[in-house]
Amino acid sequence: MTDKRASVAAGRTALGIEFGSTRVKAVLIGEDAAVLAEGVHDWENRFEHGCWTYRESDILAALQGCYAALKANVRERYDLTLTAIGALGVSGMMHGYLALDKSDRFLVPFRTWRNTITGEAAAALTEAFSFNIPERWSVAHLYQAILNGEDHVPQIAHLTTLAGYIHFLLTGERVLGVGEASGMFPIDSKTDDYDGAMLNIFGALTEEKRFPWTLRGLLPGVLPAGKAAGTLTASGAALLDPSGDLLPGVPCCPPEGDAGTGMVATNSVRVRTGNVSAGTSVFAMFVLEQALSRVYPEIDLVTTPCGDPVAMVHCNNCTADIDAWAAVFYDFAQAADLPLEKGKVFDLLYQTALSGDPDCGGLTSFNYLSGESITKTPEGVPLLLRGKESRLSFANFARNLLSGALCTLRTGYDLLKQEQVRTDVFYGHGGFFKAKQAGQTMMANALGVPVTVMETADVGGPWGMAVLALFSQIGGEETLPDFLDKHIFADAKQSAVQPDAAGQAGFDTYYQRFLRALPLEQIAAKTLK
């Protein structure tokens, strides 16, 4: 404890702040990457005017709230006021549309990754580029706004992401890490910059509009991991810590996306490694050793934080419906005057799921709070189905919730299996894996691969962002994969769960039932919206 206190007092630290879907978390680590303090601010997206969004005031309140919670945690643990930080990095939900005018004001409300309103633009750009452009990517949002004739488009001076916007507020620098940038516009991994040929194609598509900007001029600069990305300005320090305690001048690393921080947190940045991040959304990442044979609308091509190509299966929905049902059971416990904490409800759901029938007793669940491009479902509504022959029990119901959360991911993963994409190790992290072995077991059976979870799985992306900030300061000439292997994960504890034959067969039965029922979900989404 004395050593930790000395590190905090001297500023021998790195801070990672990550804006997730339901919470913003700050993690402060030492030079050995051990967690020194944490701070959390809960928030939630809004559905306003047909769009999923977070208001500008929400963003600023969340930034200050999580940092204030971190300061309080430092005070509680070490009896210190946090004033000096050794390095800083910001990460957040990738993609979306954050358009600013020349005075850096929002031109329209922030459109998050969760929106499925750019189908026409995404399809047109995919065809023009011969490269998959998903609906949630920033360029798809921009092109859809152009196709819609939205009035704000000629006024755009800057496009960025949530992480890029926060980084700009703190440093004045308009840059992104290459992994985050790869969710705005395709990246050429040979140059670690936006693909020049595709920029030219976009220019030709929009030439007749005669906008007073070029797309390259709107986009942030691109930096690989380890590069300097500015320092915390006086105004940035005052924004982050209105009390005035935080000193400016903190070196900042390139802001990254939650996919990139997940890769770092699971040591999955080397070729032939993979990871799955399962929380509000779920996405699996596979660092490629060779290009895919063709364009798949279901597969994103992004990069690691050091610019290597990655195949990504991204699903908008994962644990939100599980969370909703857990809240129902918690309310029941409260009504029955049972001493049951919320965390225990989740543990019961996940652990009891393991004792359910492998095929979930004939139950079928759609966790679609929002739409899913992979299954061609533009709008979503959570749906629970059971036939008269179904075996309804708590165990089957719980297993059904977890199984339903993985079916869309399985759809995309099957395509990568056809491409013979190989991984030497496949890591899991995120809230889905918090209950011991339950999430691992379900994921292993759903994908038919061993799933490994590290002891860092519960700190996840914010910790990964802090590690990237640390790398930018002490990594020297080492590559990011070597730095992680030698300095961060050399002695990491981990556990692997193998798929079992009965579990795999049961999930396959469930999955086929899910696919057959998909038209019902599509009808329900249109009927019940």
Image (spheres, helix red, strand yellow):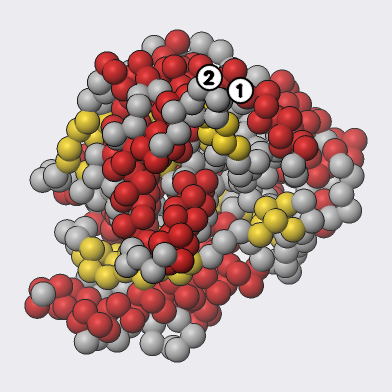
Kind of residue at disc 2: Arg
The image quarter in which residue 209 lies: top right
* Residue 122 visible: no
The local secondary structure at tag 1 comes to helix
User: For this view, does 487 lie left or right of residue 387?
Assistant: left
Image marks 2 and 1: residues in contact by CB distance under 8 Å: yes
Kind of residue at disc 1: Ala
In front: 510, or 53? 510
User: For this view, does 148 lie left or right of residue 183?
Assistant: right
User: For this view, does 229 lie left or right of residue 346?
Assistant: right
- Residue that appears at 61% across and 23% down: 517
Does residue 108 sit above or below 311 in this rendering? below
- Residue that appears at 65% across and 68% down: 56
Which residue is denoted by mark 1 in the rendering? Answer: 517
The image quarter in which residue 104 lies: bottom right
Does residue 273 sit above or below 255 in this rendering? above
Which of the image's four quarters has the C terminus? top right
* Residue 435 visible: yes
Q: CA distance from mark 2 to mark 1?
A: 6 Å
- Residue that appears at 52% across and 70% down: 62
| Residue 240: mark in rendering | none
In front: 316, or 346? 346
- Mark 1: give few (<14), some (14-19) or many (20+) Cα within 10 Å: some
Residue 234 placement (x, y as % from top left): 48, 80
Residue 287 placement (x, y as % from top left): 38, 28
Looking at the image, how many numbered discs can be counted on the residues? 2
Residue 201 placement (x, y as % from top left): 73, 28
Which residue is denoted by mark 2 in the rendering? Answer: 513
